[in-house]
Amino acid sequence: IDIKTLRGVTGGITTIDPGYKNTGSCESAITFLNGEEGILRYRGYSIEELAEKADFLEVAYLLIFGELPTQDQLNKFHSDIKEESVVDDDVKKILDAFPKSAHPMGVLSSLTSALTAFNPTTVNVNSEEDMYNAIVKILGKFPVLVAWTMRKQKGLPLNYGDNSLGYVENILKMMFEKPNEEYKQNDILLNALDKLLILHADHEQNCSTSTVRIVGSSHAGLYSSLAAGISALWGPLHGGANQAVLEMLEAIKEDGGDTHKFMNKAKDKSDPFRLMGFGHRVYKNFDPRAKIIKVAADDVLADLGIEDPVLDIAKGLAAEALSDEYFVDRKLYPNVDFYSGIIYRAMGIPVEMFTVMFALGRLPGWISQWKEMRARKEPIGRPRQIYIGETLRPFKEISER
Ligand code: ACO
């Protein structure tokens, strides 16, 4: 059936599918995901191969433009991004106006939205050239905003990176460089961050990506759509889970480290507590990203010689869940965010920044999905509902209420 005539064929029948568990919102050529078999591919390339062989910027290019770049294409892309990595001084003033205690995701969403005002040509993208410029601008400025958000929280002066460095290398420098101290790159951390960003780069029509597409479907600009996506990602059932995982592990540690007690709490239906970092809407056997990142987490911890009681609790929980009937029956396995927080913590990234790191990785995915949505001239997203409220009733004067 032609999708456009479906509504006519069904005589206006409305389907109700809370959480859109069985509803496809679009056709897409970007990411293939098979939740039953644990398969994830970007533009046809397996996530395992990309994580091993590509770097984040190549993956960003692949997602956005559909093919892996040649060396020349990659060099041009990177150099165009570097040229756009300066942020207007007035954006700094907006950042200054936030209290130090502000959650970095709220700050980042606001700053991303604010970029629209300072880059008005990115709002109405009517040509390939406009689109390309909007894309390289945000890929240049977003890491600066991420680094500044963290530096503000830590009370460090705002800085710019070093354009002779690689994209991810430069992000680490901007985040961790200290005044009056020579910055030294740690290759293990660089490799782990690169992998994490690749693994988070796209995940088809998840909550934040669907948000970016639906906001963009009204022809709102790219940056306002991204700002909405950042807000969607913030929630603990989505990207906010990586922060929630670490907070949960800390709480278990503070409580004496009894993982069994918290497993039972998660199983108790009268208790809203859930084991953060377990379960996934679409992966019902394993999360392929979690498999890759678990190895990276083990490497980082071993290489840095980190021994952390919180990490022992994490290992204990994962092992217990794998043999627990409740978790096995419901196919609840550790997801990517169970392990990503462990790496971020080992890197010295504050817990409130974890979801920001996720946003940094997801940025190319959001951009590619927005670009595809516009290129396919998708109609405005506008779901229907089944009304369950009052039927028609006469207005009651205020004196009679
Ligand atoms: N702890 C305990 N029980 C759980 C958990 C959990 N983490 N996750 C799901 N369940 C149970 C539910 O209570 C439900 O049990 P029931 O069938 O007896 O009622 C069953 O498993 C199915 O759960 P749903 O909530 O229906 O599954 P859904 O697909 O809607 O939710 C979600 C998926 C949101 C990821 C969920 O598993 C969850 O809340 N996990 C914890 C948060 C988390 O880690 N989010 C990160 C997701 S990954 C990402 O965004 C990158």
Image (cartoon, grey):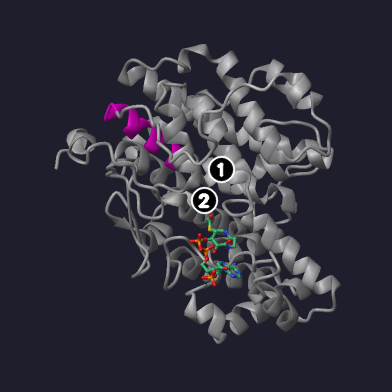
Q: Quadrant of residue 79?
A: top left
Secondary structure under badge 1?
helix
Q: For label 1, count other residues whose C-alpha is less than 10 Å away and answer few (under 14), some (14-19) or many (20+).
A: some
The x and y percentages for residue 34 are 33, 62
370 in the magenta segment: yes
Q: Which residue is mark 2?
A: 197
Which residue is located at x 83 percent, y 32 percent? Answer: 99
Rendering quadrant holding ligand 1 = bottom right
Which residue is located at x 41 percent, y 21 percent? Answer: 219
Q: For label 2, count other residues whose C-alpha is less than 10 Å away and answer few (under 14), some (14-19) or many (20+).
A: many
Which residue is located at x 46 percent, y 60 percent? Answer: 281
Separation of disc 1 and disc 2 at Cα? 7 Å
State if disc 2 and disc 1 touch (CB < 8 Å): yes
> Is the shortest distance between ligand 1 and the CB of mark 2 under 8 Å?
no
| Amino acid under disc 2 | Leu
In this rendering, the answer to whether 261 lies above or below 387 is below
Query: Could you tell me what secondary structure mostly forms the magenta stretch?
Result: helix
331 in the magenta segment: no
Q: Which residue is mark 1?
A: 360
The x and y percentages for residue 111 are 65, 27
Residue 161 visible in the displayed image: no
| Amino acid under disc 1 | Leu
Q: Quadrant of the C terminus?
A: top right
| Viewer-proximal residue among 19 and 347 | 19
